Amino acid sequence: EKLFKYFDVVPKFVSPSYKSMKIDPEKVEALIDEETMGVVCIMGNHYGGQYDRVDLVNEIVTKVNKEKGFQVGIHVDAASGGFIAPFQKDLPEWDFRLSNVLSISSSGHKFGEACCGTGWLVWRQRENLAEHVAISVSYLGGHADSYTLNFSRPATGVYSQMYKFQRLGIEGYTSIMDNMMTVAKYIRDGLKEMKGQDEKTPLFTILDDGDAQCLPVVTAMLNPSLQLPFDDIDLQYALSQGHWYVSGYTMGFEDPLGKEKKPLFHDQPSSKTMFRIVVKSNLTIRLAEHLLETFRKARLFLLEHGEGYSKYPHKKVKLHRQNTAC
């Protein structure tokens, strides 16, 4: 969003289905034209943890480039998946093995076990990084190029990431990933067992990609067929009584340029809600048991007091007064 705002770039969005939360590669072709800077695929999206099929998008980009003489490349946003996908088996190709993938970004502080603020951007080759982007400085002793907007950056993240690379290695990161996926499966299975007021219909509709080839993320929504008077935001508040913060979302986003509210998915309104649980390495099975027990208590509370939610719907809360500063 900062790129769009700061550099006046017009984004073109591919609206996925809520059932997959992945871009349809076939829809990408129609959006590429002579002004296209590049195509972005996400390895581990924010909402459900799914991986876009970068390999299929690569085929489309290759086709368009050949037919129209373009040189469109792909950037892989692996902010979350960059430290998960490399340690998972049998994934479709998503990295520099694909000819059109020119750059990959990843956050070391998410699943890379580094300190907060650590991020990485890797280019396929030096020529893909235009020289006019860099600011050359020499006053620090020697010659150095700076590519960031804010120049000065702490080195703490680099040191902590290098320590984790050496301390954990491929085997260590694989073990951590396997453990997080196991805990996510445990939570997902626990949610699947919970029923609605009839004690038969599943309380939740699972929206994530399941137990493999995705992030250790559990995403779901209250089963629409139950026609409950409360939503996933109400569930978030109920869970907070057990000292758990489970993020509830509406299925919409604010257009970074037009500011209007748009639906995330083409088959759900922007007002529809869902929730997600991100499993990190410090979320143990014992903590997951407590989380599921908190879900069970929240279920009983919401079903018992459900009518109250239909009488008192959500209201916008004004968080501050817009007074003139002294």
Image (spheres, grey):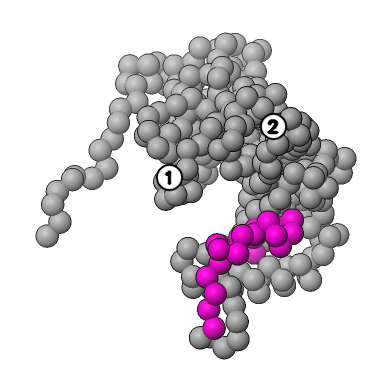
In the depicted view, which residue is nearer to us: 160 or 53? 53
Place of residue 248 in the rendered image (x, y in percent of width and height, measured from the top left): 49, 34
Q: Nearer the viewer, residue 33 or 27?
A: 33
* Contact flag, marks 1 and 2 (Cβ < 8 Å): no
Q: Name the residue: 57% across, 11% down.
A: 225
Residue named by callout 2? 68
Q: Relative to residue 63, is residue 19 drawn left or right?
A: left
What separation in Å lies between label 1 and label 2 (alpha carbons)?
25 Å
Give the amino acid type for the residue marked by disc 1 in the picture.
Asp
**Residue neighbourhood size for the residue with mark 2, other residues' Cα within 10 Å, grouped as few (<14), some (14–19), many (≥20):** few
* Spot occupied by residue 22 in the image (x, y as percentages of width and height): 66, 30
Does the magenta-highlighted stretch encompass residue 115?
A: yes
Percent across and percent down for residue 280 are 66, 51
Point 59% across, 35% down: residue: 34
Secondary structure state at the residue bearing disc 1: loop
- Magenta part of the chain: 114-138
Q: Nearer the viewer, residue 245 or 108?
A: 108
Q: Disc 2 on helix, strand or loop?
A: helix
Determine crowd level at label 1: few under 14, some 14-19, many 20+ residues with C-alpha closer than 10 A: few
Please tell me which of labels 1 and 2 falls first in the chain. 1
Query: Could you tell me residue 141's position as x and y percent?
Result: 57, 88
Q: Quadrant of the C terminus?
A: bottom left
Left or right position of 259 against 87: left
The residue that mark 1 highlights is: 8
Residue 167 image-quadrant placement: bottom right
Between 240 and 161, the residue placed more toward the observer is 161
